Amino acid sequence: MPQVNKGKELLVTTPNEIGALGKVTGAVSAAGANFITLSAWGEKDKGVFRMLTSDNVKSSAELKKLGYTITETDVLLVNLGNKPGTFSPLAKKIGDAGIEINYCYATAWSDMAVLVLSTKNNDKALGIITAS
């Protein structure tokens, strides 16, 4: 059975410029926080960062000092085994329950995979995941 926890993700918007990643990671470091997850990409003129940190309050404060826009979103953190087909049955159950998935991203290392999942109904999805 996968482990699942509720989490708060920061969505940080910056100018899409060289050095933005260093500024964002530097602000989180200055906050004394660690990254739990990080996903980053550029969209035309803006940089977009989705992250969970060990201290979102302090991280947000440091990022705001740089003039960045920050939004906090409820997400689910799912700890899955790192083997083929682990997420597929879970995704099917969520879909069969009529829950729309907004987005997800994951990383895997060794025998563990961590999935960040945002749905239209995280509480219902949480129930489905914990029952799996």
Image: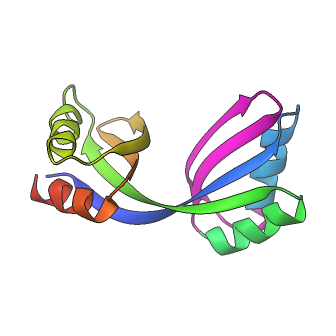
Please, what is the dominant secondary structure of the magenta stretch? strand
- Please say if 43 is above or below 47: above
Q: Position of residue 124 (x, y in %)?
A: 23, 61
Q: How many marks on residues?
A: 0
Magenta stretch bounds: 29-54
- Looking at the image, can residue 40 be seen? yes
Quarter holding residue 115: top left
Q: Residue 122 location, x and y as percent?
A: 33, 60
Judge left or right: residue 54 versus residue 13: left
Residue 63 colored in magenta in the image: no
The residue at the point 71 percent across, 60 percent down is: 70
Q: Is residue 68 left or right of residue 73?
A: right
In the image, is residue 38 part of the stretch drawn in magenta? yes
Could you say where residue 46 lies in the image, as x and y percent from the top left?
79, 37
Q: Is residue 25 left or right of residue 6?
A: right
Q: Is residue 2 above or below residue 20?
A: below
Residue situated furthest bottom in the rendering: 57
Place of residue 19 in the rendered image (x, y in percent of width and height, measured from the top left): 87, 37
Q: Nearer the viewer, residue 9 or 24?
A: 9
